[in-house]
Image: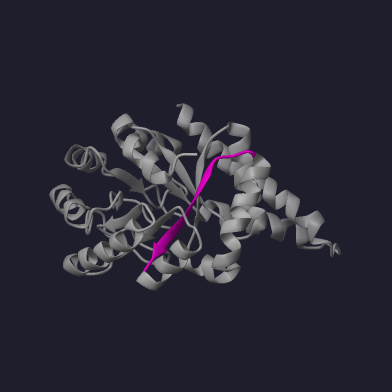
Amino acid sequence: MKTLKEIYKTIAAKNETLFAMNFYNLETLQALLKAASVKKRSVILQVSPSSLDYMGASVISPMVKAAAEEFGVTVWLHLDHAKKIETVETALKNGFDSVMIDGSELELEKNIILTKEAVALASWNGVPVEAELGYVAKLGQTQEYGKSFTNPEEAKMFVSETGVDALAIAIGTAHGFYKETPKLDFERLRKIRNALPNTVLVLHGSSGLPDSDLIEAMKLGINKINVATEFKDAFMSSLKENICGSDEIDIRKVFPKAIEKVSEIAGHKLALLNK
């Protein structure tokens, strides 16, 4: 199996895309792998620092490896939105295939310093590093359209200075669900791709985006699409629906419906790669 660093060297040039999907427990992991198996797609599986704390770094890596082998799917394990170098170190020590250091809320120079530190650390393991430039609003935060969007020339300088393999860019998306349909700045994406022809470009905040926007983003150069919130919401909504008013105490009879719901959504996303 090729390393993700090797994959990253080619997908930008070939204008190819991988979906990166967050999981939160064994059940959501199984759901995503089932979808990938059915669609015959390789995927990046992601955990945030809070999921790292919840499941345990030493548990996550072998669990993903064993589950991927069972489903017959090629996967890479990625650390999403680490804010601290110590979190990156923990992921690397536990065999993660990729890491993200997120200094997007810092001043540019501090973001560069933090990112360079992560790149130097990961280079010992041959692991690719993702960073974020510009600002993609987090859950509960608002972002005025155009404010803190990624500047193409700044992006070129940032990649040159830090040596990152992948760059998450801000073009109008936000984490979580949208109260109204977002307007993505595709012209900005086009300019960023032209400025960085060999860098993997990442779209965060994809949950709830229309399929047409995701397809257009892929055509214009997005190589990695992150999806998380839709999976959490589908899993919890299904559990609530099946638990309320039920006397069932066997979780093995309750979880499968929630697993199936998440798998359906993941399968729909992966099918967009054929569009």
**Is 82 placed left or right of 192 in the picture?**
right
Task: Give residue 212's position: percent from left, percent from top.
Answer: 41, 34
Give the residue displayed 44% in from the left and 62% down from the top: 92
Q: Main secondary structure of the magenta part?
A: strand
Residue extending farthest front: 124
**Is 72 placed left or right of 129 in the picture?**
right
Residues 146 and 205: in front is 205
Give the residue displayed 37% in from the left and 56% down from the top: 174
In which quarter of the view is residue 249 placed?
bottom right
Residues 14 and 224: in front is 14
Residues 92 and 243: in front is 92
**Is 236 placed left or right of 159 in the picture?**
right
What span is colored magenta in the figure?
72-84
Task: Give residue 251's position: percent from left, percent from top.
Answer: 79, 61
Task: Give residue 46's position: percent from left, percent from top.
Answer: 49, 54
Within the magenta stretch, is there residue 11?
no
Residue extending farthest top: 275
Within the magenta stretch, is there residue 74?
yes
